[in-house]
Image (spheres, grey):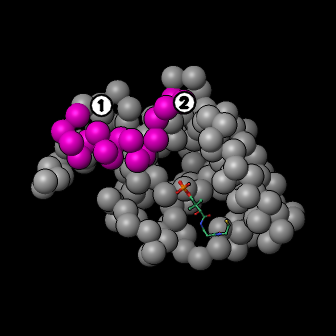
Amino acid sequence: MRIAVYPGSFDPPTHGHMDLIRRAARLFDRLIIAVGRNPGKDTLFEAGDRVEMLREITEDLANVEVEVFDGLLMDFAKGKGASAVVRGLRAVSDFDSEFQMALMNRTLAPEIETVFLMASAEHMFVSSSIVKEVAELGGDIRELVPEPVARRLAARPPTEV
Ligand code: PNS
């Protein structure tokens, strides 16, 4: 049984995340999406809401589960018996921080491999932060995120200026 963890903030999940989830779910027997709670980070959605959205948009994927994690990612991954951590790479600008994170994680747990999947061309520019910015300023983000996510973003009150 090959188990992988796909960690992230998912604040909110985008089509880019969804594309990666579908592809990773084909590579592993079990894929656990790990939603980082990170109390130090200001998020638009509570961890519970992010988990709910991810469960809704992955309900057709039988080998995908969604959980919250606190603390070190590698402790969570070890606890789940994972052999790999999956991360997505978009542009070269992602590389530095991802490389640093992967090397740190390898130091902490050499038995767990970080596997990078390249973003699909149409999702190269999509990020949670750009989606949040456009949504908060009233722009149309329906092309960028799954429908349940667009619905929740639309339900939020507009940012006061
Ligand atoms: O979607 P993001 O914000 O790029 O996800 C980052 C995340 C949550 C995967 C990363 O911050 C993380 O792994 N946090 C847990 C803390 C940890 O394990 N730190 C040491 C490795 S750098």
Q: Secondary structure at mark 1?
A: loop
- The image shows residue 66 at horizontal and vertical percentages of 51, 57
Q: What amino acid type should be assigned to the residue bearing mark 2?
A: Met
- The image shows residue 134 at horizontal and vertical percentages of 29, 39
Residue indicated by mark 2 = 124
Residue pictured at 41% horizontal, 54% vertical: 11
Q: Secondary structure at mark 2?
A: loop
As displayed, is residue 65 above or below residue 105? above
Is label 1 within 8 A of ligand 1 (CB to nearest ligand atom)? no
Q: Which residues are magenta?
A: 123-139
Residue indicated by mark 1 = 142
As displayed, is residue 125 above or below residue 45? above
- The image shows residue 1 at horizontal and vertical percentages of 78, 52
In front here: 18 or 106?
A: 106
Tell me the quadrant of ligand 1. bottom right
User: Relative to residue 105, is residue 16 drawn left or right?
Assistant: left
In front here: 131 or 51?
A: 131
Q: Calculate the distance from the C-alpha at mark 2 to the C-alpha at mark 1.
A: 16 Å
Residue 45 visible somewhere in the drawing: yes
- The image shows residue 7 at horizontal and vertical percentages of 59, 57
User: How packed is label 1: few (under 14 Cα within 10 Å), some, or many (20 or more)?
Assistant: some
User: Relative to residue 78, is residue 47 drawn left or right?
Assistant: left
Asked whether 129 falls inside the magenta stretch, the response is: yes
Q: What amino acid type should be assigned to the residue bearing mark 1?
A: Arg
